[in-house]
Amino acid sequence: GKERRDTHTKKKKKKKRVRKNNNMPEYGKADYWDERYKANDTTFDWYVSYEPLKDILTPIVKPDSKCLVVGCGNSRLSAQLYDTGVHDITNIDISEVVINQMKNR
């Protein structure tokens, strides 16, 4: 009989190199955020302010609710929740600098 030739050629897998672009901020590093917050001690709402969330949060978050704000940064959300009567709020962030700044407010 005839020999069968394998028509599928094996290709060597190329290793993908992860290039580190020195121009990109290192958002996943606490040092990046610490320096950023040291340079600018103010508040900033990254996504949206409390006002557009008010109608969504009010039926869910009651004054006796426990709230965890993950990646709180220097957002005003916790202070605005507090002003509406929600007082059991825990803020966490990768940056110890911003946590200390927010404690002082």
Image (cartoon, rainbow, N blue to C red):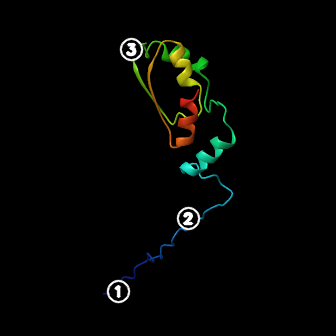
Nearest to N terminus: mark 3 or mark 2? 2
The location of residue 80, given as percent across then percent down, is: 56, 19
**Label 1, on which residue?**
3
Identify the residue under disc 3. 64
If you read the primary sequence from the N terminus, does the residue marked by circle 3 or circle 1 appear first?
1
Residue 18, labelled with which disc?
Answer: 2
Could you classify mark 2 by the number of other residues whose Cα lies within 10 Å: few (under 14), some (14-19), or many (20 or more)?
A: few
Q: Amino acid at mark 3?
A: Asp
* Extreme-front residue of the structure: 104
- Please name whichever residue, 82 or 19, is drawn nearer the observer in this view of the structure: 82
User: 53 and 70: which one is in front?
Assistant: 70
Quadrant location of the C terminus?
Answer: top right
The residue carrying pointer 1 sits among few (fewer than 14), some (14 to 19) or many (20 or more) residues within 10 Å by Cα, namely few
Whether tag 3 and tag 2 are in contact, CB under 8 A, the answer is no
Residue drawn at x 42%, y 13% as measured from the top left: 62
SS under mark 1: loop
Image point (62%, 29%), residue name: 45
How far is mark 3 from mark 2, CA to CA? Answer: 47 Å
Disc 3 secondary structure class: loop
The mark found on residue 70 in the picture is: none
Q: Residue at x 48, y 73 (%)?
A: 13
Mark 3 vs mark 1, foreground winner is 3
Horizontal and vertical percent for residue 35? 63, 47
The percent position of residue 94, horizontal first and vertical second, equals: 50, 43
The quarter of the picture where residue 61 lies is: top left
Considering the numbered disc 2 on the image, is that residue within a helix, a strand or a loop?
A: loop
Q: CA distance from mark 1 to mark 2?
A: 43 Å
